[in-house]
Amino acid sequence: MALTEERTGKTYLILTYGCQMNENDSERLAGQLRDLGYAAAARPEDADVILLNTCCVRESAEKKVHGKIGELKRLKAANPNLIIGVAGCMAQKDKDKLFKRAPHIDLVLGTHNIHQLGESIAEIGRARGRVLAVWEQAERLAPGVPTVRKAGIAAWLPIMYGCNNFCTYCIVPYVRGRERSRPVDEVVAEAAELAAQGFREVTLLGQNVNSYGKDVPGHADFADLLAAVDKVAGIARIRYMTSHPRDMNDKVIAAVKAGRHVCEHFHLPIQAGNDAVLAAMNRGYTTADYRRLVAAIRAAVPACSLTTDIIVGFPGETEAMFADTLALMAEVRFDAAYTFLYSQRSGTPAAVMADQIPPAVKKERLKRLMDVQNDVSLALNRELVGAEVEVLVEGESKNDANKMMGRTRTNKIVIWDKTGREAPGDLATVAVTAAQTWVLKGRLI
Ligand code: 5AD
Ligand code: SF4
């Protein structure tokens, strides 16, 4: 093989849908293309390879991808040598059905096959045919794959792949397979490499980070991993997602409290505030368990922030059950909530449950939920006016080059007038002068 670093003059474009795990997978797709001599394309019209890294967690995500696949037909007609690939969760779920639906697709690459992009592209080049690379399950942990990350101060760092939980609404366990943890030393080595590259923050990624290590007998657990990454020189902040409330425990709470760099932010998806709904979802905890957990976290880490995910319109959710969710939101007072309309995913148990909720009812509930949450978010942010907060400077504000943007350890966005004294990657102190629902405004100290 010729030297892989050589430039071929060819270019690629990767479009990413869905979660942070997909963003990291896209970084690994980009790394393989770079090693094949491809550079990033400036415009879709110029690209030799276009990859869609897809999500199927909700129907809305799939619709976006199908729309984009349709659009790409025009580019393929203009340039028959263009290679169009579909990777990720939809590829894993739909496999060769994607070729039938859209014959202009050249490559379908499953979630367990991300590392095979290079050989798949070579095979398409040799045979000028289509390639379907979808393993039913990971034969082993994905090997180390070259990664191209966007320059910045925060990086994604996967610690485990897959999910064993089978929440009844969720497609993820079917398309991402069983839980597989990366060894501690591998995660620590990657964190150190990221620090050496100038990254200041890492977010440890997994579908359920609290079950880290449980797939390997005698393995370190998530609290041990947090403690190990906390020692990596140069990493100023450590975040992680997502936690499962059933598996969050005192040892992890203590590790967050003890970790110098571990941020005081807990993202704990509750999904619903009614016990019958939680049981039907197979979540493995009750609202009383969740309240106890929040109390334990707030007792140990008083200045923490708490965010959540909520699904409205799960099958069988009555108005009274939904009212329980609203009441719990008002009681717990989340800093922010990511709220979703329940989406029927075929193959999951909830898809065939009785009493599916009509779309209009779901939408109306979502609106009420967001109204309650926005009031709480604003009230909590207002409590910070007058306080001084530590921000990690990210860069200029997207909307205004005279302003700077950073985040607090509790993951709140802060905007302030640029002084010229702050540089991306710095830890700075900002006095909060005003609060909005999603952002804090302040002055650099
Ligand atoms: N419908 C709506 N939301 C869903 N989520 C997962 N599956 C579905 C579905 N079928 C939400 C959950 C999860 C988040 C990442 O996506 O709230 O925490
Ligand atoms: Fe889906 Fe539940 Fe696994 Fe999260 S924990 S990915 S919601 S099955």
Image (cartoon, rainbow, N blue to C red):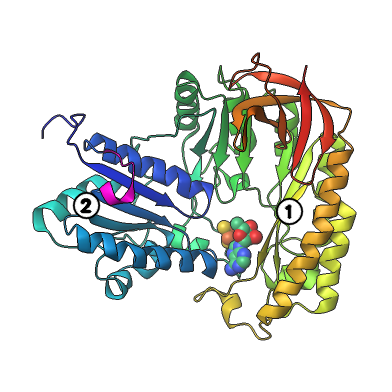
The answer to the question of whether label 2 and label 1 lie on touching residues, with beta carbons closer than 8 A, is no
Q: Which of the 4 quarters of the picture holds residue 76?
A: bottom left
Asked if one can make out residue 333 in the rendered structure from this viewpoint, the answer is no
Q: Disc 2 versus disc 1: distance between alpha carbons?
A: 40 Å
Question: Would residue 44 be counted in the magenta stretch?
Answer: yes
Q: Which residue is mark 1?
A: 337
Kind of residue at disc 1: Ala
The foreground one among 18 and 181 is: 18
Q: Point out the stretch of residues depicted in magenta.
A: 39-46
The picture quadrant for ligand 1 comes to bottom right
Residue 13 against residue 109 in the figure, above or below = above
Tell me residue 68's x, y (percent): 39, 62
Residue at point 19%, 37% (across, down): 9
Residue 414, above or below 275: above
- Residue positioned most to the bottom: 354
User: Which quarter of the rendering shows the N terminus?
Assistant: top left
Which residue in the structure is indicated by mark 2? 120
